[in-house]
Image: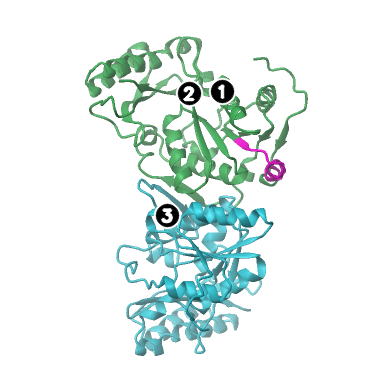
Chain colours: A cyan, B green
Amino acid sequence: MAFAARSGGLATARSVAALRVRVGDWRADGHTVALVPTMGALHRGHGALIEAARRIADRVIVSLFVNPTQFGPSEDFQAYPRDEGRDAAFCDDLGVDLLFAPTVTEMYPAGFATSIRVAGLTEGQCGAFRPGHFDGVATVVAKLFTQARPDSALFGEKDFQQLAVIRRLNRDLDLGVNVVGVPTVREADGLALSSRNAYLSADERRIAPALYRSLQDAARAIAGGARVPAACAEAREQVLKAGFASVDYVECVDVDSLKPLVEFEPARPARILAAARLGRARLIDNLAVIG
Amino acid sequence: MAFAARSGGLATARSVAALRVRVGDWRADGHTVALVPTMGALHRGHGALIEAARRIADRVIVSLFVNPTQFGPSEDFQAYPRDEGRDAAFCDDLGVDLLFAPTVTEMYPAGFATSIRVAGLTEGQCGAFRPGHFDGVATVVAKLFTQARPDSALFGEKDFQQLAVIRRLNRDLDLGVNVVGVPTVREADGLALSSRNAYLSADERRIAPALYRSLQDAARAIAGGARVPAACAEAREQVLKAGFASVDYVECVDVDSLKPLVEFEPARPARILAAARLGRARLIDNLAVIG
């Protein structure tokens, strides 16, 4: 995809009020609206979300907001890549109708005091390693949903736990949005696309696909009858052996509850999820276990 | 007000879906909508909310839902008075357009896991004595707002801290509702109307107005230059002397932050708030300190 200079056609709303005016106009014209929430640093994975959004709605909003409340104090909020001009060109090329790029103070004005917690689903996996992360995600996504009131919102399956949390949040708070998960987009060598791949050195980039390969091997082994804990332990070893610095978790879980499975049952949809650290990056990935 | 047998004219929605159909029809006809959230056991205080709602909107919804998540384990969830037939007749007489009376499982289906917390405002006063109470209030009110999507919602000033929490919640989550506070309605002897007054014995009912009188005395003393802590301590003594079993708090606070004031400044709006126990009832009341 070319990142041509913008033709200047793509509108950007910086305030909730401006967003609502635009959406209100679309609604008055009978159009359906899809929202693609992002933290910017857009790549082909976001491109797949935008393309899916265009297929299911008349108008597509992409939000660009690096949400401070979902980063822990020792995480990469400051370093997170930001390039709005490039992101805007990317969206323009894909036919996005509106960018929503609020400031931090527009989203969290002075006196802001509210947070949303989804219990259960947020306790394991990334939630155990990133305290408060999913509270920040749930709060900002609820806000984006109430701000834009889209018919649909699209999220990548790469952030599988996040997707499960958002589905739960959306149901529990009656937000009325059709939450759509979109399959992970990968590089040719299997590495899941992520804005954080930009943190990898050339050497680390060569190591990175081992995460996906080890999950594929584990999923295959589990589907073939291997014991779940043994297969996950083996994947962990593979990832470390490939050169990752550490592994936060490798777990095979029930797709709805995200509870770790001890035994795989082909009739019960399962997914294998992992997070591991490589240089400055913390990479996550997941895939279905097909029995 | 007479509680005549119902003429059968008042529609009742028991599901979110039915509520949304009705509100959608009103919207399509260009009508504005106001919501009066209640736990039932309606009295003239609720009547004042309904009348205010009718003045500002074309259509008025009253929700009846005794919300389990805002009661602590040792509180009066089971005992809370319930009489839907009487409440429906009350609403019908006042020209309410729709009752929304969901079941607990409609509001909190199996797997429900989400809670909302408003920090700061919920920590003092009743929040200190009723852990989790305002999380339950914030969560259910957010749900009612996203379910009904009213233009306005009306709440009594009697629950002053609740009103402050809901205003904050509504702003922070961009719920877009016009939150209206309505002055407390009182009996002739000053007792604030409350569904929990039904718990009082005849003797306790004679004692109860002492709460309001002591707040009036304290507010007058503070406005007249008395030291705030001394005036609050004096009110506490008066309430106990009148026969209340205990006093949870008497505090003079800034109306926006609900932070206790040490000194009253006439230019800074202040309010005196109290909670005290009398027999089976925990009564609350508050009033403005006018300098």
Q: Mark 1 lies on which chain?
A: B
Q: Where is residue A288 in the image (x, y as percent from the top left)?
A: 58, 76
Residue nearest the viewer, comparing B19 with B268: B268
Q: Crowdedness of circle 3 by 10 Å Cα count: few (<14), some, many (20+)?
A: many
Q: Which amino acid does label 1 sit on?
A: Ala
Whether labels 1 and 2 share one chain:
yes
Sequence order check, earlier mark of 1 and 2: 1
Q: Which mark is residue B142?
A: none
Q: Residue at x 26, y 25 (%)?
A: B264
Q: For the residues marked 1 and 2, what is the alpha-carbon distance in whole angstroms?
A: 8 Å
Which secondary structure lies at badge 2? loop
Chain for disc number 3:
A
Q: Mark 1 points at which residue?
A: B48
| Residue at image mark 2 | B183
Q: Distance between the residues labelled 3 and 2?
A: 32 Å
Splitting the image into 4 quarters, where does residue B31 fall? top right
Residue A136: image location, x then y, percent: 42, 58
- Mark 3: amino acid: Met
| Front residue (pair B14, A290) | B14
Label for residue A107?
A: 3
Labels 1 & 2 near each other (Cβ < 8 A): yes
Left or right of B89: which side holds A155?
left
As measured in the structure, the alpha-carbon distance from the residue carrying label 1 to the one carrying label 3 is 35 Å
